Image: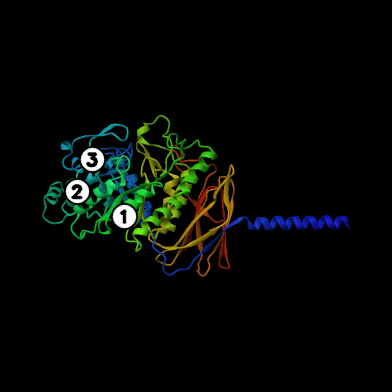
Amino acid sequence: MKQHLNSYIIIAFIMILSSVKAQEKSTITLENTDDAPTISRHIYGHFAEHLGRSIYDGIYVGPDSSIPNTDGVRNDIIQALRDIQIPNLRWPGGCFADTYHWMDGIGPQEDRPSIVNTWWGGVTEDNSFGTHNFLNLCEELGAEPYLAGNVGSGEVKELADWVQYVNHDGVSPMAKLRRENGREKPWNVKYWGVGNEMWGCGGNMTPEFYANLYRQYATFMGDWSNSGGLYRIASGASEDDYHWTEVLMRDIPKNLIEGVALHSYSVIEWNDKGPAVEFTEDQYFKTMKKALRMEELIIKHLEIMDKYDPNHEIDLIVDEWGGWYNVEEGTNPGFLYQQNTMRDAMIAGATLNIFNNHSDRVKMANLAQTVNVLQAVALTKDEQMLLTPTYHVMKMYTVHHDATLIPVKLSGLDYTYNGESLPAISVSASKSEKDKMNISLVNIDSKKRNTVEIDLGALKAGKMKGEILKSGKLQDHNTFENPDIITPEEFTDFDSRNGKIDVTLPPFSVVVLKEI
């Protein structure tokens, strides 16, 4: 009898364990809706500032370089950016934008004055990469240019002349000057930033002062009705400065503004940002906590915007985001050169999912930055170039470009460390123009495999194909000696049946499932 009792206890214990194990998974429900927004491809935009080795050596090596190039721009960078279907590129800054005078970068090279980059390393630049170089590069890439105007140290006429120089197709002094410099037809630049970080390096202004200054600049950039179709973006808040957004929305007339910016970096501590590679789990957890806070920032800034703009005529533009750490040992502190690990892949995957899920109001975002600076998608060293984990996430997520959002409901597992918890799973989903489903999943847990059950609900999906980005250690990264340590692989650890998809995600991994 005692043996039977022990057997029953063991069986009951196994059943309890099985039940607990069955519950240890995230549940995702896809919602079928007729009014879902389009995920603008511009959410996947990039940012190239005159900073360190971003432009010179990173993007531009000059037409006489032994490194293969097109009009001075590295061919390997051109191909890499084409392969991730780069939708837009922001230039020339950043802080640099409010010290940059665009007319110094046009005309014969020998006539261009030099400039001291006081913000980033105090180096002297020769202005060999200017407006024509940048806009021609964007044409080469099939990307929309996003020009950041100088409001901090510039003048209203200077920005108005720049608009006319690049956009006017008729007879005007600036159109004449453009033609004299070798460009007959205008580039028709749509996206314009009216200053950058005006609360800081753009002039340490109050929001009230900047709002009035913005009105002046925006007025003279176009005509009465903005018939040129300029998309004017106000320099927005840093992080949780909700008062800044409140003042801009309150004081700038809707007919003068199309977008409000937001800047947020995944920084542990500004005075000591921690290493880019040899970081601890504590530093990883704090970084991810900051990255996931993007959700809260977007929600709260949008609440303010909706109060003044209930019809959603003004967009939220997150034109600087990404991980920021201490520079690599032995490099110029002003150049912001850092390596890129699986931690950065986690930041990228989770942040892009947040943007996708708020694509009704977030219409553009710009990863900081493109090459050799902060959370770059590519690093260069002489003739060599490597692609980072962040690059691979961007490429995997191209399935979401201009696709229709599928809203999701997520419940389930946490990533717990030292008594604190974060959501372990991040997800977004979309449907392409060919009605094909795409699902991007991120498991940020540093140690635990997590199971996800995706309930397709009323939606139907055919055969799915998977791709995964993973590695053995969070600190793993690609190097010039071994550039393919981290690259996407085929993913098969999922099962589709009865309107559900069960997925098992390795620790710190990014998975994209797409219907074929």
Residue shown at 43% from the left, 53% from the top: 352
Q: Is residue 167 visible?
A: yes
Q: Write down the residue under mark 1.
A: 250
In depth, the one of 443 and 247 nearer the eye is 247
Disc 1 or disc 3, which is closer to the eye? 1
Residue shown at 16% from the left, 55% from the top: 168
Amino acid type at image mark 3: Ser
Q: Write down the residue under mark 3.
A: 153
In depth, the one of 242 and 54 nearer the eye is 242
Q: Write down the residue under mark 2.
A: 162
Amino acid type at image mark 2: Trp
Between the residue at mark 2 and the residue at mark 3, the CA separation in whole angstroms equals 15 Å
- Per the image, label 2 sits on a secondary structure element best described as helix
**Marked residue nearer the N-terminal end (1 or 3):** 3
Q: Mark 2 and mark 1 in contact? Answer it, CB < 8 Å.
A: no
Disc 2: CA contacts within 10 A as few (<14), some (14-19) or many (>=20): many
Q: Is residue 81 visible?
A: no
